[in-house]
Image: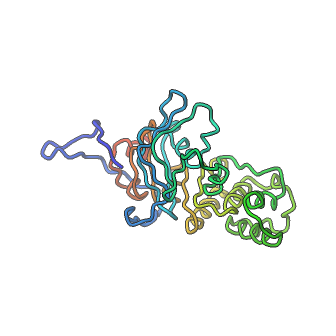
Amino acid sequence: MTEHDPTFSTTADTGAATLPKVKPPAIKMRKTEDLASLKIAISLRNFNSWYTDFHALHDIDLDIPENRVTAFIGPSGCGKSTLLRWINRMNDLIAGARCEGTLDLHGDNLLDRKHDVVELRRRVGMVFQKPNPFPKSIFDNVAFGPRLHMKMAKSDLGDLVERSLRQAALWEEVKDRLKDSALGLSGGQQQRLCIARAVAVSPEVLLMDEPCSALDPKSTAAVEDLISELRERYTIVIVTHNMQQAARASDYTAFMHLGDLVEYNATEQIFSKPENERTQNYITGRFG
């Protein structure tokens, strides 16, 4: 997505916008794919959001592809977490929050008030900024969702817990202490446990709101590696302030500013050849 920005400079001969070259992050980014060739999981059209009288999101049009990682970046207060939380209706819990427009998941209108939000949040899992394991055993944390949503034999539940912990790259670290409290795990392990808890109910989408901001570098690397593996099974949307992380972990990046979706493109394009001056200024550290 691009927009006209009057602060662009133009050449005298052609009137074409010119931007200084942006140095891309010194990391390898994913190969660019044509968005039009991919199946779309989440689609927003003319999406607006308010907190009482504050207009938080303005006319958002966005297509999020299936089985890819999409990053929302932008300065604090730009609306990226607000947008993320509408995808599984977490904003329903906030007094004065309302929205207009369309927000579809595989063609299903997620804003339909007839939806069972418990079932919706099974389809759209969420991992928060700070790990939030339940004060239960490691096993019971992962088994909580399946017990709520599914009917299965005890042996099948055990297999599901193991499979979910393996998907979260945590099984080998906890297989001998499944009855221990999840609160005894390290921060990085707790975050991976929360991911295992989310995937245990077979969601279609995983939302991650700053999932590494409370973690040390080693744990951050482990979660980023996990995100790369999980994209084969799930559509992942991640909010991050860390642009290096967005470049490493995502296939597509949406840059937001003051409630606007300023630019949305393949991550490689956003970080190497942004089309909007506000995007360029943000990724080069001129504001944010």
Residue 270 horizontal side relative to residue 238, left or right? left
Q: Residue furthest front?
A: 114
Q: Residue at x 70, y 61 (%)?
A: 196
x then y, percent, for residue 200: 70, 63
x then y, percent, for residue 85: 58, 45
Above or below for 214 versus 194: above
x then y, percent, for residue 195: 68, 58
Above or below for 148 versus 163: above
The scheme the figure's colours follow is rainbow
Q: Nearer the viewer, residue 141 or 40?
A: 40
Q: Residue at x 59, y 53 (%)?
A: 207
Above or below for 199 versus 281: below
Q: Residue furthest right?
A: 179
Q: Residue at x 32, y 43 (%)?
A: 3
Regarding residue 240, the answer to whether it shows in the image is no
Q: Residue at x 65, y 64 (%)?
A: 202
Residue 50 horizontal side relative to residue 37, left or right? right
Q: Residue furthest left?
A: 13
Regarding residue 96, the answer to whether it shows in the image is yes
Q: Nearer the viewer, residue 17 or 157?
A: 157
Q: Nearer the viewer, residue 96 or 232?
A: 96
Give residue 287's quadrant in the image. top left
x then y, percent, for residue 246: 51, 54
